[in-house]
Amino acid sequence: MEPEELSVNGEWPDLKTKVIEKLIAQEYWYQGKLEEAANVIWLKISGKWYRLYFDYGIVFWRESNETPHYVKPEASGDYDYPLNDLTEKCDLSGKAIESCEGSVITGGSQVVFKFENGKIIKFKNIDDFTSIET
């Protein structure tokens, strides 16, 4: 049986040896409960923003003219999308990316970043929920 091929929508950027300026995970909260740790992943490389996100195992890559920004929900809103800056939390500022690879895993897909300082961050999308492993 052959391994399943990863489905990618958009062009996978060449990130090897590129220095990371920012890595931000936009969370998804519903009624005060964290539903998804990484609804959208934002990367800033060489002054340019990229968006990485998943939909039922499909990996989406987009260049973006937008910058991530927090929009405060309405007082009665059940939804919230705060920003989690992984750059500082994981000591990644100014570090080079050694590799950025995607693969099919049981129930979905994952994208794994390896950095020059030995740090590994995995974004796993299983059953359409994206988690972060550091």
Image: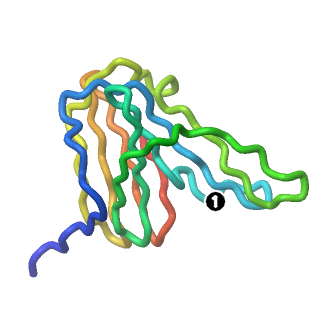
Q: Please, is residue 46 above or below residue 4 in the view? A: above
Instruction: Give me the residue at 58% from left, 57% from top.
Output: 36
Residue that lies at the very extreme toward the top in this rendered image: 94
Instruction: Give me the residue at 50% from left, 51% from top.
Output: 40
| Number of other residues with Cα within 10 Å of mark 1, as a class: few under 14, some 14 to 19, many 20 or more | some
Give residue 107's quadrant in the image.
bottom left
Q: Is residue 70 left or right of residue 108?
A: right
Instruction: Give me the residue at 45% from left, 27% from top.
Output: 90
Give coordinates of residue 84: x percent, y percent.
58, 37
**Residue in the foreground of this view, choosing between 89 and 69:** 69
**Residue in the foreground of this view, choosing between 58 and 119:** 58
Q: Is residue 75 left or right of residue 12?
A: right
Q: Is residue 115 left or right of residue 57?
A: left
- Quadrant that contains the N terminus: bottom left
**The residue tagged with tag 1: helix, strand or loop?**
strand
Please name the amino acid that badge 1 sits on: Glu
Give coordinates of residue 114: x percent, y percent.
27, 36
Name the residue that disc number 1 marks: 35
